[in-house]
Image: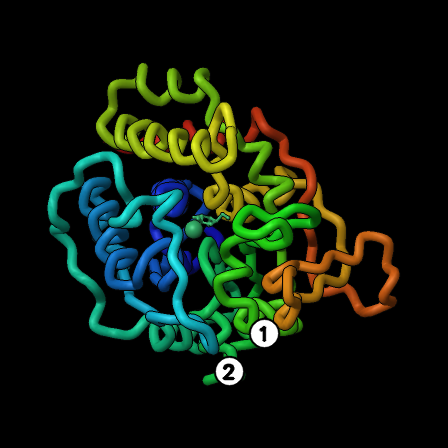
Amino acid sequence: KQKIILDCDPGHDDALAILLAAHHPTLELLAITTVAGNQSVLKTSQNALKVCSLANIRTVPVAMGMERPLLRPARFAPDIHGESGLDGPVLPEPTVSLASQHAVDLMIELLLQSDGDIILVATAPLTNIAYAMRREPAILPKIRGVSLMGGAIGLGNVTPSAEFNIWADPEAAAIVFGCGRPITMVPLEVTHQALATEAIFERLRSSQRMVATFAADLLTFFAESYRTAFGFVAPPVHDPCAVAAVIDPMLIATQLMSVCIETSGEWSSGRTVCDVYGKLQQPANAYVGHTLKVDRFWDLFIDTILTYA
Ligand code: BDR
Ligand code: CA
């Protein structure tokens, strides 16, 4: 099994990423770490615990991480995910509790103890991972790779140039993209191909299973946010794509290139500057996804969700 740590900010699509990561038979989910992003880290942590409780994920530690970006004030996304960070379905109070360790400590410990076989999957601002890399550089050679949902080759979603996860903490993103380990970047161009259409809703709902119904309920709220904010007919299911890229490396076609993070632009802060044509002649640092095998993605995702009660 491929060992992963999922660093997330649930978040509707993060919740779906947790469900995929915890039950796919080829993955071993070592920990869920949370960070400020879609909402405060207190809220995203609580949401992670609620999702784990509902889905009966009881053996994976959930550790709370950084409450604000490395240098900037925290900025959340209530317009997309609501005030709780996971608005929509009413969730019971969690029946699992937080790990006592800080997310960054847990990440460092797991990596140092490992045989170098852990992939970090990030579906949130990169604050925890960047901080861990700076605090304990000995983890670097231990990281097999990073698969992250973030950035865009072209247009952003929170500003015209920047995608939310990178925009929220560009300095952290710059550290991660500069870490020297293999990075797979799953940008908006890919996740906007993973659209939860009516047919997808039907596949989830017709199963009449509790967790599949929960997934559909999350997507119902998310669909409304995306209709209002972007005029999307069907919502893009971003974060599970970064997990799926680890499960099935052929699922997303990528191009190896140099990616720089804009940290100082007046209009373009948080932009992932993707050197598609090699104009800057800098060493490549990321496999940038561009094309998703859509049907294969949905089969993989739904088949896994249907393994829950
Ligand atoms: C990313 O931003 C968040 O709102 C989502 O959870 C996803 O990780 C998409 O830009
Ligand atoms: Ca997220």
Mark 2 close to ligand 2, CB under 8 Å: no
Q: How far apart are the two marked residues, 2 and 1, measured between alpha carbons?
A: 8 Å
Question: Is 39 left or right of 239, judged from the image as shown?
Answer: left
Bin the neighbour count of mark 1 within 10 Å (Cα to Cα): few under 14, some 14-19, many 20 and up.
Answer: some
Question: Is 181 left or right of 36, judged from the image as shown?
Answer: right
- The residue carrying mark 1 is 175
* Residue at disc 2, secondary structure: helix
> 144 or 49: nearer the eye?
49
Number of disc labels: 2
Question: Residue at 26% across / 74% down in the picture?
Answer: 101
Q: How is the image coloured?
A: rainbow
Query: Residue type at mark 2?
Result: Arg
* Residue at disc 1, secondary structure: helix
Question: Residue at 80% across / 52% down in the picture?
Answer: 276
- The residue carrying mark 2 is 134
Query: Residue type at mark 1?
Result: Ile
> 246 or 229: nearer the eye?
229
Above/below status of 216 relative to 127: above
Q: x and y percent of residue 226 in the render? A: 45, 34
Q: Are marks 2 and 1 in contact (CB under 8 Å)?
A: yes
The answer to whether residue 23 is visible is no
Bin the neighbour count of mark 2 within 10 Å (Cα to Cα): few under 14, some 14-19, many 20 and up.
Answer: some
Above/below status of 274 relative to 102: above
